[in-house]
Image (tube, rainbow, N blue to C red):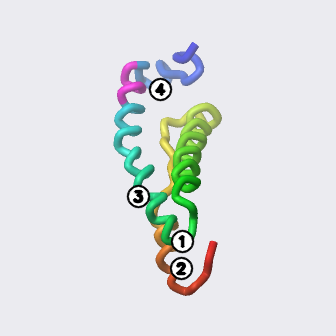
């Protein structure tokens, strides 16, 4: 079923290759769970909620890309916008 759902043969790949690629991508982007909430704390966000939000955003974004768009893309929050919120707007006294 998985092979038909994701059209693996049509895309010239195998289930094993996709699982290895997914695991590699996960390891490469799992770091975001630590620094992202740490940055958001400077903008006044609670640490625990920021951590959960970061994880859920990455999970649901990636699942939407897999099951709705049928694309092998991982999606997660990026630190550039968070740093802007925390350090630029926070320096101006603007809260979230």
Of circles 3 and 4, which is in front? 3
Q: Which residue is mark 4?
A: 11
Task: Calculate the distance from the C-alpha at mark 2 to the C-alpha at mark 3.
Answer: 17 Å
Q: Give coordinates of residue 86: x percent, y percent.
A: 50, 73
Q: Which residue is mark 1?
A: 43
Task: Calculate the distance from the C-alpha at mark 2 to the C-alpha at mark 1.
Answer: 6 Å
Sequence-first disc among 2 and 3: 3
Q: Which residue is mark 3?
A: 35
Q: Nearer the viewer, residue 94 or 28?
A: 94
Range covered by the magenta-colored residues: 16-20
46 to 92, vertically: above or below:
above
Could you tell me which secondary element the residue under label 2 belongs to? loop
Task: Please give the label number shown on residue 9.
Answer: none
Q: Nearer the viewer, residue 96 or 72?
A: 96
Task: Please give the label number shown on residue 90.
Answer: 2
Task: Calculate the distance from the C-alpha at mark 3 to the C-alpha at mark 4.
Answer: 35 Å
Could you tell me which secondary element the residue under label 4 belongs to? loop
Could you tell me which secondary element the residue under label 1 belongs to? loop
Q: Give coordinates of residue 95: x percent, y percent.
A: 62, 76
Kindly identify the residue that appears in the image at 58 percent across and 36 percent down: 63
Kindly identify the residue that appears in the image at 48 percent across and 21 percent down: 8
Sequence-first disc among 4 and 2: 4
83 to 31, vertically: above or below:
below
Q: Is residue 20 left or right of residue 9?
A: left
Task: Calculate the distance from the C-alpha at mark 3 to the C-alpha at mark 1.
Answer: 13 Å
Task: Calculate the distance from the C-alpha at mark 4 to the C-alpha at mark 2.
Answer: 46 Å
Q: Callout 2 environment at 10 Å: few (<14), some (14 to 19), or many (20+)? A: some
Q: Quadrant of the C terminus?
A: bottom right
């Amino acid at each position: 079923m998985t092979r038909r759902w994701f059209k693996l043969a049509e895309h010239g790949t195998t289930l094993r290759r996709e699982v290895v690629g997914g695991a590699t991508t996960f390891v490469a982007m799992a770091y975001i769970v630590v620094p992202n909430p740490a940055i958001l704390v400077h903008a006044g966000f609670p640490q625990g909620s920021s951590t959960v939000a970061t994880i859920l955003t990455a999970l649901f974004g990636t699942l939407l890309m897999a099951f709705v768009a049928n694309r092998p893309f991982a999606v997660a929050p990026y630190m550039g916008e968070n740093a802007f919120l925390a350090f630029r707007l926070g320096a101006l006294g603007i809260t979230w």
